[in-house]
Image (tube, rainbow, N blue to C red):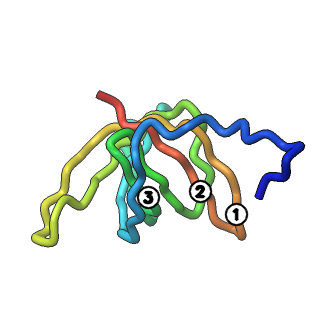
Amino acid sequence: MLNSMEEDVTPPRRAKRVSIDSDIEFEKSIHLISENIVYSGRGRDISSGGLGLVNGERLEVGSVIKIYLPFDGKGTIVPVFGEVVWSEEIDGQFRSGVRFLA
């Protein structure tokens, strides 16, 4: 909570976020090997602009990942690309913000 002397410098969100609690798989390109590795994480929130993701390792800011988003309750998966814009450790897990790429 801000007191009268503090200023909120957080930029406003571009799109409304919706809380989700869903298993998410994603790939990150490894330049030294010829294949991509599929990782698992947990979706925290999603908007038209991006995804909040929690997983077991830090994602490199600026890296592009391929995310396999569950689309409906029938098993439909939609692959989308996103850029990691931030990543931080919280209680032994890593939370990352991923911006969807057009």
SS for tag 1? strand
Q: Which mark is residue 95?
A: 2
Quick one: which residue is furthest to the right in this view?
A: 5
Q: Disc 1 vs disc 3: Cβ atoms closer than 8 Å?
A: no
Task: Read off the residue under disc 3.
Answer: 45
Q: Is residue 3 found left or right of 62 in the rendered image?
A: right
Q: Residue at x 13, y 61 (%)?
A: 76
Q: Is residue 101 above or below residue 92?
A: above
Name the secondary structure under disc 2: strand
Kind of residue at disc 2 = Arg
Q: Local crowd at mark 2 within 10 Å, few (<14), some, or many (≥20)?
A: many
Q: Percent x, y for residue 59?
A: 57, 46
Question: Which callout, 1 or 3, points to the residue nearer the camera?
Answer: 3
Q: Earlier in the sequence, mark 1 or mark 2?
A: 1
Q: CA distance from mark 1 to mark 2?
A: 7 Å
| Figure quadrant of the C terminus | top left
Query: Which residue carries the number 1 mark?
Result: 90
Where residue 28 sits, quadrant-wise, is top left
Q: Dot 1, how many residues are within 10 Å of its Cα: few (below 14), some (14-19), or many (20+)?
A: few
Labelled disc at residue 46? none
Q: Secondary structure at mark 3?
A: strand
**Residue reaching furthest top?**
102
- Residue at x-position 23% and y-position 46%: 79
